[in-house]
Each structure stands twice: as structure tokens, then as C-alpha cells.
Image (spheres, rainbow, N blue to C red):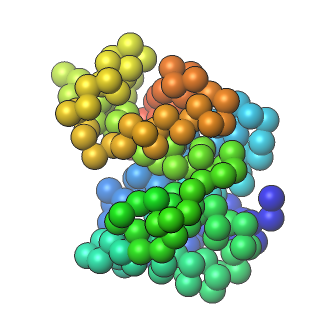
Amino acid sequence: MDLGINKEEAKKLLNKYVQDEVVKMHCRESEAIMRELAKHFNEDEDEWGIIGLLHDIDWDLTKSNPREHTVKAVEILKEAGASDFLIETIVSHGYGSKLCGINQEKTRTTKIQHALAAAETLTGLIISTALVQPDKKLSSVKLESLKKKFKTKSFAAKCDREIIIECEKIGLPLDEFLRIGLKALQGISDKLGL
């Protein structure tokens, strides 16, 4: 994979374009899960992490007009020297979404595209599960609890379970994917303040 952007450049880009701390935290959460997935699949952790970190690079610019989400990302990433591979992978997390403005008819086809979409969606379910714990800590979240929350469609209802289940398209059973995601976020809980 040639991303055209290294880890330090990715961090600078995130800090330049993402000012909303909640969005920034979500990007870091996505990075952590992507890194853990890379480790599981024996892929390059930095490259997968960069993809997770930058996937919502344009959200601050597009949150009032979500149809522009991923459209602005293309412009930002091209200007920063990102490869076509990086741009297409990031844009792919919006494929099929009624919210994003481009590529609604496209579907994800590669392992890394499915991994990104599933990982960035899973962050919401894990964080929501942590926030309903008595101490509001990721360390208190157990895999069994996360599995129950996944099955409860009304819980964290905006976390699209169909996208999370795309983990199966990359050879990961749901339980294993939930375990990997939880481990990743528990590993950065101090940075998240959870």
C-alpha cells in the first residue's frame, strides 16, 4: 500500500482540519481499532492506523451538509499528497450511505474497505457501552456486555449493525471483531479519558 502520507503528516493533517474534540477522539478510536486489526492480519499497523485516523478528515467542514462528507476529503487528501489508494479507501466508508454525497451506488470490495467501515462504526457502540457503565470506564466493559448491546437495536441506534457485521467479509466472526475492537479502545482508554 502506498498512502502518500506518513504518520506524522497524518497527525498534522488531522490537527489542521479537525477541531471538534469529539470527532478527533472518534478518529483516534478508529485508528486504534484499525491498528489492532492490522496486527491481527499481519498488515502494516501504521498504514492501517493512518487510514483510520484520517477517515473523517472533512467532517468539521461538512457536518452541516453531510452530503459533502467524503467529497471534501478527496480535495484535502489530494492537496496533502495522498495516494489514490488512500483516497479511495477513505471515501469507501461512505459507500451506500444516504448521508454522503458521492458513490452511494458503490459497494466496498476490499478487506481494508470493509475493515475501515466496520471499525469506525464499532467505535460508537463500544464508547456508548462504556458510558452506561457505573464508572463510565472502558475497563469496565466486558465482551459479553458488548455482545448484548450489539443485539439490542435500540441501544446506540445510530451504530449501523449491518456495517459492523461487514467484519465477517474480512474473515472475522462478530465475537472476535468485538473482542479486537474492545481491546484496542481499552488500550488507549487513558488518552480517551474513559
In the image, 87 versus 32, the foreground residue is 87
Pick the quarter of the image with the C terminus: top left
Q: Is residue 6 left or right of residue 93?
A: right
Q: Is residue 142 visible?
A: no
In the image, 63 versus 139, the foreground residue is 63
Whole-percent x and y of residue 121?
A: 43, 45
The quadrant holding residue 151 is top left
Q: Is residue 75 above or below residue 60?
A: below
The quadrant holding residue 145 is top left
Q: Residue at x 71, y 54 (%)?
A: 47
Whole-percent x and y of residue 78?
A: 64, 82
Q: Residue at x 54, y 28 (%)?
A: 177
The quadrant holding residue 82 is bottom right
Q: Is residue 74 left or right of residue 29?
A: right
Whole-percent x and y of residue 138?
A: 36, 28
Task: Tally the numbered discs.
Answer: 0
Q: Is residue 155 above or below residue 70?
A: above
Q: Is residue 130 above or below residue 69?
A: above
Whole-percent x and y of residue 181?
A: 51, 32
Q: Residue at x 36, y 22 (%)?
A: 146
Q: Is residue 121 visible?
A: yes
In the image, 123 versus 107, the foreground residue is 107
In the image, 7 versus 48, the foreground residue is 48
Q: Residue at x 40, y 68 (%)?
A: 100
Pick the quarter of the image with the N terminus: bottom right
Residue farthest to the top, as pictured: 144
